[in-house]
């Protein structure tokens, strides 16, 4: 089969100088796949809720009031974190592990790939999916995502633009095996009896033969017989049967490399390529399906070598066939293109994450990017702490402004704080059994707010700036309110343990959003598309640090900060320790030289790539199969 003329497609040049054509997924298919994924998430939510309820009602927990035991609190805290993990981790996890597919995408045969046809990584998947909060979040934000898919040239939503990805169709295509039928001449003819256009007309008749009524079938057969003239076989059979015999003879001749009547050298070359290559293509399709289901590991060491050798041969067939087709959309060209595209995606798939590489990424690569991005992070800090200082000083000088800045709920808490400070109580009530729940809710809320600050960068930074300004005004207003009432130590004792991690994470998350916005507004000497993708991947590195810091801050804020009997000096000591740990962490990647994050377009052109060493024998470890395959291709 061939691609529909209505299909959108994109051409990608591989390192082997072969052009692949991907069919882009449309809005309908993507919405159906998203619906399946949402249903799976909802099912997971219901299953988690049911499991939590069953655990909380188990006989071991019925001795006390329901929901009022430390074990119940811990279970509920785990439930909150799991819900958050499903909400934000489902797409990232599946696309990272399943090479750009979620269960919904796999059902509708869709796949996310990077520009250049390369497979997605966890980092790329994180960037495109964290931006769902802007363009695919329920409500009006869906409009932005749909409009972006409809208007962009490659059907990208905002997350795809930032991550440099596209969503493509992966269709299952089949071509019939060659069945040799004797031709009228003993020697192979130079060309077939029918031209290419005549053959396509006959093929449509044969395809519709079973659906036509007898009268309509015979009438069309008579007209076609008159059109084909002397090409009709000499036979006593009915005209319709003669047309079927003619179709079999023409199809077999083409499969054996005979060029259509009227074709010159290019047409004959095309038929010869098809005839010689079709058996190898069919064999390769079987192995490709096996590799796509279980990875290159499923082929074994010798199988990988054979797979790569066939890939190179079929890629060469594709290049020759594309030239010989002279712009025509023929079945075999589309079929071979899908084979090469599928194999290319497997061979150039990034190696899986090991524990060592993960730790290196978190503790060396990510902090290096934080230091490299000090300018947008510094600007985010200014947008946060500048308004905080202004609102704090304003409230100290004019306490009446509290109603406009912090709201009635915070004023009531501050009034109660005066009494709590006099009686030696803490900033808030501290029923110890609720600390795990409080910690999990704080972690989920802080991470989600910071994701919004990062994703807001795609709106030219408007949402990022607004979030930073409003959070700064709120933070400064609270401190100013407590200072105006003479109970500033009360809130300092509460925020001291976790503020270093939390405020730093907010600044880094805001910096990630501003970095993304800078790629749109200030691309420099890069193209805007390239700047967005490069800055988006750098911002994704920053979000790794943000999540780590917010996890630690949430644990401290839920488990340590509320303890009322710890003196202020003890809380400050914890905060000082956090500052020291934060400094050591951010210095962890000091030995790594910062360099731009590579894009697919940096590596998909051999003219820009360095020479590769000669292929080496494949190692016995099957986990390195993709790396071995890439070396052998090069």
Image (cartoon, rainbow, N blue to C red):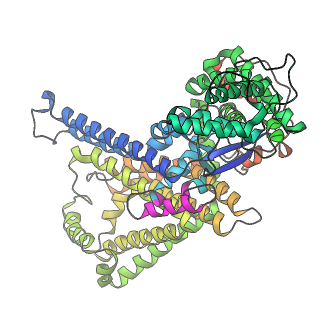
Image x and y of residue 216, in percent: 54, 39
Quadrant in which residue 85 is drawn = top left
The residue sitting at 73% across, 17% down in the picture is: 180
Image x and y of residue 89, in percent: 45, 43
- Relative to residue 444, is residue 224 depicted above or below? above
Nearer-the-camera pick, 16 or 527: 16
- Relative to residue 416, is residue 548 depicted above or below? above
Q: Can residue 215 be seen in this view?
A: yes
Nearer-the-camera pick, 173 or 16: 173
As for residue 392 lying within the magenta part, the answer is no
Quadrant in which residue 118 is drawn = top right
Q: Can residue 620 be seen in this view?
A: no
As for residue 135 lying within the magenta part, the answer is yes
Q: Bounds of the magenta span?
A: 134-159
**27 to the left or right of 87:** right
Image x and y of residue 546, in percent: 50, 52
Q: How many labels does the image show?
A: 0
- The quadrant in which the C terminus is found is top right
């Amino acid at each position: 089969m061939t691609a529909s003329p209505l299909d959108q497609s994109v051409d990608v040049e591989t390192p082997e100088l072969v052009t692949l054509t991907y069919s882009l997924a449309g809005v309908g298919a993507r919405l159906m796949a998203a619906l399946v994924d949402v249903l799976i998430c909802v099912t997971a939510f219901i299953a988690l809720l049911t499991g939590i309820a069953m655990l909380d009602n188990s006989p071991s927990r019925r001795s006390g009031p329901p929901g009022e035991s430390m074990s119940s609190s811990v279970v509920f805290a785990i439930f909150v974190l799991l819900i958050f993990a499903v909400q934000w981790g489902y797409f990232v996890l599946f696309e990272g592990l399943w090479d750009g597919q979620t269960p919904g995408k796999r059902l509708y045969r869709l796949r996310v790939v990077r520009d250049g046809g390369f497979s997605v990584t966890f980092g790329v998947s994180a960037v495109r999916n964290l931006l769902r909060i802007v363009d695919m979040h329920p409500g009006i934000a869906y409009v932005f995502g749909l409009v972006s898919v409809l208007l962009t040239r490659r059907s990208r939503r905002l997350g795809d633009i930032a991550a440099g990805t596209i969503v493509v169709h992966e269709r299952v295509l089949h071509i019939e095996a060659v069945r040799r039928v004797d031709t009228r001449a003993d020697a192979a003819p130079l060309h077939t009896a029918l031209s290419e256009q005549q053959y396509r007309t006959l093929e449509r008749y044969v395809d519709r033969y079973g659906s036509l009524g007898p009268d309509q079938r015979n009438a069309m057969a008579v007209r076609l017989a008159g059109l084909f003239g002397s090409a009709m076989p000499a036979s006593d059979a009915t005209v319709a049967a003669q047309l079927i015999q003619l179709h079999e003879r023409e199809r077999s001749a083409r499969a054996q490399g005979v060029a259509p009547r009227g074709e010159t050298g290019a047409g004959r070359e095309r038929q010869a390529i098809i005839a010689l290559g079709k058996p190898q293509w069919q064999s390769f399709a079987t192995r490709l399906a096996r590799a796509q289901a279980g990875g290159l590991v499923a082929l074994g060491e010798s199988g990988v070598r054979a797979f790569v050798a066939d890939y190179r041969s079929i890629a060469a067939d594709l290049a020759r066939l594309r030239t010989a087709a002279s712009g025509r959309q023929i079945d075999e060209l589309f079929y071979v293109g899908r084979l090469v595209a599928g194999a290319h995606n497997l061979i150039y798939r990034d190696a899986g994450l090991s524990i060592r590489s993960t730790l290196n990424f978190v503790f060396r690569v990510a902090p290096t990017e934080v230091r490299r991005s000090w300018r947008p992070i510094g600007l985010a800090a200014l947008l946060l702490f500048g308004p905080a200082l202004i609102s704090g000083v304003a409230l100290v000088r004019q306490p009446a402004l509290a109603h406009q800045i912090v709201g009635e709920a915070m004023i009531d808490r501050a009034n109660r704080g005066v009494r709590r400070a006099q009686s030696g109580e803490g900033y808030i009530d501290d029923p110890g059994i609720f600390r795990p729940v409080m910690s999990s809710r704080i972690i989920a809320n802080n991470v989600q707010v910071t994701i919004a600050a990062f994703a807001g960068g795609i709106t030219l930074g408007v949402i990022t700036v607004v979030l930073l300004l409003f959070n700064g005004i709120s933070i400064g207003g609270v401190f100013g309110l407590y200072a105006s009432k003479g109970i500033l130590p009360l809130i300092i004792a509460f925020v001291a343990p976790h503020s270093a991690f939390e405020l730093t994470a907010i600044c880094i998350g805001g910096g990630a959003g501003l970095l993304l916005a800078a790629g749109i507004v200030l691309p420099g000497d890069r193209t805007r598309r390239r700047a967005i993708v490069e800055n988006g991947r750098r911002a994704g590195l920053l979000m790794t640090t943000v999540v780590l810091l917010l996890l630690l801050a949430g644990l401290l804020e839920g488990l340590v900060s509320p303890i009322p009997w710890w003196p202020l000096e003890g809380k400050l000591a914890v905060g000082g320790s956090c500052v020291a740990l934060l400094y050591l962490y951010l210095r962890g990647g000091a030995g790594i030289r910062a360099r731009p994050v590579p894009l697919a377009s940096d590596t998909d052109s051999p003219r820009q790539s360095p020479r590769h060493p000669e292929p080496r024998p494949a190692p016995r470890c099957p986990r390195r199969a993709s790396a071995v395959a890439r070396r052998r291709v090069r």
